[in-house]
Amino acid sequence: MPGIYFLYPRLLFLLFLAPFFIFVYLFSFFYNKKKAVIFPNFEIMEKISGMGVFSKNFAALYLNVIVLCLLIFSVAGMGVSYTARTSSQSYVIVLDSSSSMGATDFLPNRLETAKTAAKSFIDSLPVGTEVGIISFSGNANVVQEKENSKLKLKMALDGIDFGTSTEGTNVYGAIIAAQKVFAGVRNKAVILISDGQINVGSAEQIVNYANQNGIVIHTFAIGTSGGGITEFNTVSKVDEEFLQALSLNTGGLSFSVGNAIEFDKSFSKLLQPAERDVSIDISFYLILASIGLFSLNWVLYNFRFRIVP
């Protein structure tokens, strides 16, 4: 049964501000109209008040009230819940951002190609699928906690850059971070996109931890057979065997990606659709809508409401 929920319903009392603002607007309207009687020259009155005293255009009032309500709904954490055909698993995209991902066998480089592919995967997901995002080099960084907003997820991917604080490729630390992101989730799948050049931890260590915590690891080996040139003018080749070992021993799938088109074909094999209840937080979209309406109101106020009485 579709429904609407609020994470912070007590904040809905702020909706009482709407009738207050309407009252203030109407009071000011009639107050200015009363003053206009004192000034027989209405043209002078308009210049003094900065508005048409006999204006019947309430569009600005309507827009302001709508913007106010949208902001209050957003602050209260408005969401919708319903039953939908979605993924039976939650995912964490674990993206290698070490220096070797700057190799140019993919244009402009491996990292940018991986980010573009990950965004395509997110676009293809059924509504309500929860996804987290982690980038890693020498250490792991949680870029985005579990989220089903495709816009937020893609914005988080756009913000990933090469790791600079600690050199290395710490897949083990990234899987530990993914387990924390999965908190409370039963069906867990990691999507590991890397060239496999690990130099922190071992495959056995990673597999044991993943199996102990029920994490399935799907691996995407990104890199061509000939390798690519890095910023240090060295040739970086992909280590497919290491990545295959992770997926094989955790019940996941392993893919060797030689070009960007192969990414999309591989991602489609990961989805396991199922009917279940989903909850979608729409507060972020309400904020965007309120900003848009506020901008519209500002433009109208400065170019129309001041001109048309």
Image: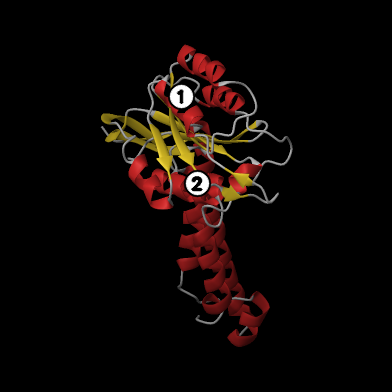
Q: Amino acid at mark 1?
A: Ala
Query: For the residue labelled by badge 2, is the local secondary structure a helix, a strand or a loop?
Result: helix
Q: Position of residue 188 (x, y in %)?
A: 42, 24
Query: For the residue labelled by badge 1, is the local secondary structure a helix, a strand or a loop?
Result: helix
Furthest residue to the top? 212
Q: Residues within 10 Å of mark 2 (few under 14, many from 20)?
A: many
Q: Amino acid at mark 2?
A: Ala
Locate residue 294 relative to residue 2 in the image: left or right: right
Q: Position of residue 111 (x, y in %)?
A: 56, 47
Residue hosting label 2: 114
Sequence-first tag of 2 and 1: 2
Numbered badge on residue 245: 1
Q: Residues within 10 Å of mark 1 (few under 14, many from 20)?
A: some
Q: Is residue 114 visible?
A: yes
At a point 65% along the width and 85% down the height, the residue shown is 44
Q: Is residue 286 visible?
A: no
Q: Position of residue 252 (x, y in %)?
A: 39, 26
Locate residue 5 relative to residue 181 in the image: left or right: left
